[in-house]
Amino acid sequence: MGFLKKIIPLIVLIVFLEACSITIIKVKTKIDPEAFSMFGSTPQRNFFVPESVSDSLKLKWETSTSGGFANTSVTINDSLVFIGDLSGKVYAFNFYNGKEIGYLKDKGAVYTAPIISKFLIIYAVAIPDDNESILYFYDFSEGTVFRDIKVPGRIINEIVSTNDGYAAATEDGQILKYNSYGLPGWKIKIDSHIHVSPAFENGMIILGDDDGEIICVDNKEGKIIYKNKIGGHFLGGVSIKNGTAFLGNDNGTIYAVELKTGKISWQFNTGARVAMTPAFDDENVYAGNLNGDFFALGLKSGKVKWKFHSEGLFNVTPLITNNFLFIPDLNGELHIISKVDGKTEKTLQLDGRAKLTPVLYKNILFIGFDRGVLQAYEFEK
């Protein structure tokens, strides 16, 4: 009986500590002006790295999280690599050796990439049973929560950094703005669900909804500039290049849209559902569909430059370099293909279905796949 009296309070304490977010990331580092600070690196969602790389990869390190990944990416600041998982944790790993620095835990799921702003980690935990999210502003230099905000609705779309704060879109159709200190600003409710990650440029936030509408919102005032119904259920995310927004829908169509007006510049039907964020470089737009077809389209014309086919489905945005594209598929393969003609240079077999958009930072390639496995590769000459 004396043993039980001692052990029961201990068990209760452990359960209590697990239920509460008492885990910690606390590390001193420098502010990185070249940080890969959000999904797509910039508010326009830019997946192009203007570097020429080798097609030979050597595994540098491998680590894992306790939950699987959504279709997101790592973010990186100086010597720290951050990633969220579907068990409700946000991890920090050492950039050079993959050693776990610490993690933050909550009771929901993290669907999106943590945003890094100086020494803050901004991330959302979606709580499915309560149809709400907790938006955290966490100071990893001090190991403390700077601000936490209860948000009605699940944040499963990537948060976007604006020039004066952050914008998030919930699954049930809310668009919310927060300033740089995490204080709530404006909010809009539309009559549709949202499964598209917004992008930002020149004071405008743009995204699509389940009703096939493209919606543009004034970042400062929170007023809708236009709503243009042009297609089917929009998925994935928006990317912006020189005032033109690119996004794809359930009907398999890629649209190029004038950011200021919402008018369609061109459209291209890929033949199957598009669930990824289109990527671009200075000449082309790149996107794949759930039939395993991947296209390079002229940036201004939308005309097909080349087509690549895989037996795996494409729903993860590729990484683009000067000479290659790195394209993961759901068949457990990472395709390294020529940017000139779309021909396969090499194929890397993964131990699971690809989940993370590849990230290239300081000549290290980061990829992730099923079961929360995160790998870092070096380029060999």
Image: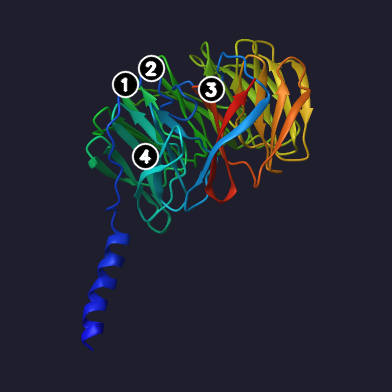
Label 1: element kind: loop
In whole angstroms, how far apart are the C-alphas of marks 3 and 1?
A: 37 Å
**Image point (66%, 42%), residue name:** 350
| Above/below status of 174 relative to 352 | above
Under mark 4, the amino acid is Tyr
In whole angstroms, how far apart are the C-alphas of marks 4 and 3?
A: 26 Å
**Image point (50%, 35%), residue name:** 73
Q: Which residue is mark 1?
A: 220
Q: How many marks?
A: 4
Q: Position of residue 172 (x, y in %)?
A: 45, 45
Which of the two discs, 3 and 1, sits closer to the camera? 3
Q: Position of residue 89 (x, y in %)?
A: 40, 49
Q: Which of the marked residues, 3 or 1, is nearer the chain's N terminus? A: 1
**Image point (27%, 53%), residue name:** 22
- Residue 256 in view: yes
Label 3: element kind: loop
Q: Which residue is mark 4?
A: 123
